[in-house]
Image (cartoon, helix red, strand yellow):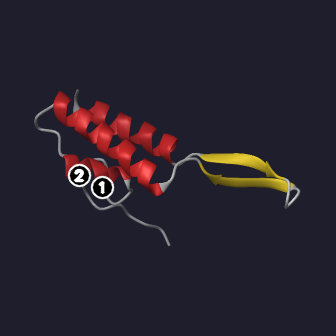
């Protein structure tokens, strides 16, 4: 796998892991949105994918990839500009 593939996988994982689920709450008589995965499950998914990527390319930078997935850096490892 190449850097381009790792970035695409991180983008897809970020979208998948961040998904919400919507259920009808009988008590509130309304639809309620909640996270699809717990923080622990998110961590397990990320570790699994990072281990897979490491197996595919010995130059894979596990730390930078996880930081990119978390939105802490850009795809090249640089700081992300936050508009606020």
Residue farthest to the left, as pictured = 58
The mark found on residue 13 in the picture is none
Q: Residue at x 25, y 33 (%)?
A: 52
- Residue at the outermost front position: 27
> Is residue 76 at all visible to an observer of this figure?
no
Circle 2 crowding by C-alpha within 10 Å: few under 14, some 14–19, many from 20: some
Q: Report helix, strand or loop for mark 2.
A: helix
The quadrant holding residue 1 is: top left
Q: Quadrant of residue 82?
A: bottom left
Q: Residues within 10 Å of mark 1 (few under 14, many from 20)?
A: some
Q: Position of residue 13 (x, y in %)?
A: 43, 40
Q: CB of mark 1 within 8 Å of CB of mark 2?
A: yes
Residue 64 circle label: 2
**Residue 50 visible from this viewpoint:** yes
Residue nearer the viewer, 59 or 4? 59
What's the distance in space between the residues labelled 1 and 2, CA to CA? 5 Å
Q: Secondary structure at mark 1?
A: helix
Q: Position of residue 21 (x, y in %)?
A: 66, 46
> Relative to 80, is 12 on the left or the right?
right
Disc 1 marks which residue?
A: 67
Q: Nearer the viewer, residue 27 or 20?
A: 27
Q: Residue furthest bottom?
A: 84
Residue drawn at 21 percent across, 52 percent down: 63
Number of callouts:
2
Name above or below for residue 37 compared with residue 13.
below
Left or right relative to 15: residue 70: left
The x and y percentages for residue 36 are: 58, 47
């Amino acid at each position: 796998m190449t850097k381009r593939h790792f970035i695409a996988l991180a983008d897809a994982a970020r979208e998948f892991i961040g998904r919400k689920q919507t259920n009808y709450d009988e008590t509130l008589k309304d639809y309620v949105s909640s996270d699809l995965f717990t923080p622990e499950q998110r961590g397990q998914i990320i570790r699994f994918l990072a281990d897979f990527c490491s197996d595919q390319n010995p130059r894979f930078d596990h730390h930078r990839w996880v930081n990119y997935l978390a939105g802490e850096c850009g795809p090249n490892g640089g700081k992300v500009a936050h508009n606020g």
